[in-house]
Image (cartoon, grey):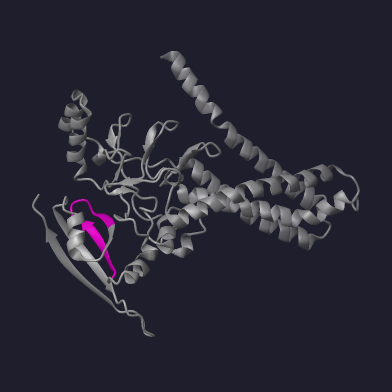
Amino acid sequence: MAPSHVLRCCQRALNWIPVLFINLVVGWSYYAYVVELCVYTIPNNAERISYLVIFHIFLTMFVWSYWKTICSRPAAASKAFGLPRAEKELYEREERAETQQEILKKVARDLPVFTRTAGGAIRYCDHCQIIKPDRCHHCSTCEMCVLKMDHHCPWVNNCVGFSNYKYFVLFLAYASLYCVVICATVIKYFIKFWTKQLPDTHAKFHILFLFFVAALFFVSILSLLSYHLWLVGKNRTTIEAFRAPVFINGQDKSGFSLGFKRNVAEVFGDEAKYWIFPVFSSLGDGLSFVTRLVHIDPEQANSVLQHNGKRPVIVYVFLSNIQSLSWVLNCDVTSIAALLMERLTLVCLVTIFNTHRTTAKRKTVEYFFDISFVC
C-alpha cells in the first residue's frame, strides 16, 4: 500500500508541472512587458500609461478565469443516482449481465436518464457505483464521475465539465486577447530593435522573444478557442464530438442541440451581463439536460415539417416526478404519446406555430394537457 500511495503523490505533484510552466511564462511576460518595455524602452509617458492600463485589464481577466478553471472542483452526481441498498446488494450478487441491467433499468425509471451505452444498456460506473447522469463520464485522473465532462486538461490540472466549462472558454478567450494586446503594442518596438533603430540593450532580447512567444501562443490558443466556440454553438462536449451520445431511439450527434441561442445560454447563462466574467451563470444543475428524442435539429424542424406539408409542433415534456425537461418534435399528439409510453404521468406544454407566414408576427397558441398511462 505504501509504495502505491507514494506513487500517487508523485503523480499528483507531476501533474502540476504544466500549470507551473504556464505561470512561469505569464510571470516572465509580465516582467518583460512592464519593466523592459514600458519602463526602459517606451519614452512617452502617455503611451506608457495607456499600455499599462490595457495590459493589466486583460491580464486580470486572463488570470482570474484561468485560476477559476483550476480551482473549481468538478461537479459529481448526487446520491440519488446511487443504487438503493437492496438493489445494490442484488446487483453485486448477480453475475448475469441481463439481470443486472434489469435492476439498473428499474432504478433508472425514476431518474432523468435518457442516454445509453453503445449497446443500449444503462450507463453504470462500477468505480463510483452510480448510474451515470446524461453527459457524465468517469475521469481516471480525477478518480470520479464528472458531470457534463468535456475533457481532462493537463494545463489546468483539472477536469473541464459542468462546473467550470464557462471559465475554461473564457480562459481561452482572454488568453488569446492577452496575446493580441502584447503583439499589437510590442510590434513597433520589435521592428525598431530588429532593424537596429534602437540601441542593443538588455531589453532587446526580452522584447524580441516576447513578441515571438505571444504570437506562437496566440495561434495555438486561437485554434482551440475556435473549436470550443463551435462546440458551444452545437451544445456538444469534446467527448460527444468524437463519440455521439446514444439515446433510447439510437445515436444522435445533435441530441442536446436546442438552437444556437439556447445552446450558448446553457453555457453562459441567460443574462448577457455575466457572460464576460468568470462567475458561474450556466443553466441547469448538470444532472439533467434538455434532450431531443428524434433526429431533427430544432433549427431545421419548422422548415422540414412545412416542406412535408405537416404542421410543426414543439412539445416541452415535464416529467412530474423528476422535474426533467425533454424535447420532442413530431407532427401530432398521438405519435408523441406513443414515444413516451414508458412514463406514467406527463404534463405537456404544446406550442403550435402558424404555418402561414404573413407580414405580421406569427401567432402562437399555447395550451396545457395531461396524459396518464398505465403500464
Question: Residue 241, position in %: x, y?
Answer: 45, 47
Residue name at image x 57 percent, y 53 percent: 173
Whether residue 85 is in magenta: the answer is no
Residue name at image x 23 percent, y 54 percent: 323
Whether residue 316 is in magenta: the answer is yes
> Which one is nearer the viewer's eye here, 326 or 197?
326
> Which one is nearer the viewer's eye here, 63 or 107?
107
Instruction: Using the image, determine if residue 332 lies above or below residue 115.
Output: below
In the image, farthest residue toward the bottom = 359
Principal secondary structure, stretch drawn in magenta: strand
Task: Name the quadrant of the N terminus.
Answer: top left
Instruction: Using the image, determine if residue 143 lies above or below residue 356.
Output: above
Q: How many marks?
A: 0
Image-quadrant location for residue 103: top left
**Relative side of 139 to 370, left or right:** right
Q: Is residue 338 visible?
A: yes
In the image, farthest residue toward the top = 2
Residue name at image x 33 percent, y 29 percent: 127
Q: Which residues are magenta?
A: 312-326
Question: Residue 124, position in %: x, y?
Answer: 29, 35
In the image, farthest residue toward the front = 308
Q: Is residue 61 visible?
A: no
Residue name at image x 33 percent, y 50 percent: 285
**Relative side of 58 to 348, left or right:** right
Question: Residue 254, position in %: x, y?
Answer: 39, 53
> Which one is nearer the viewer's eye here, 328 or 112?
328
Question: Residue 99, position in %: x, y?
Answer: 18, 31
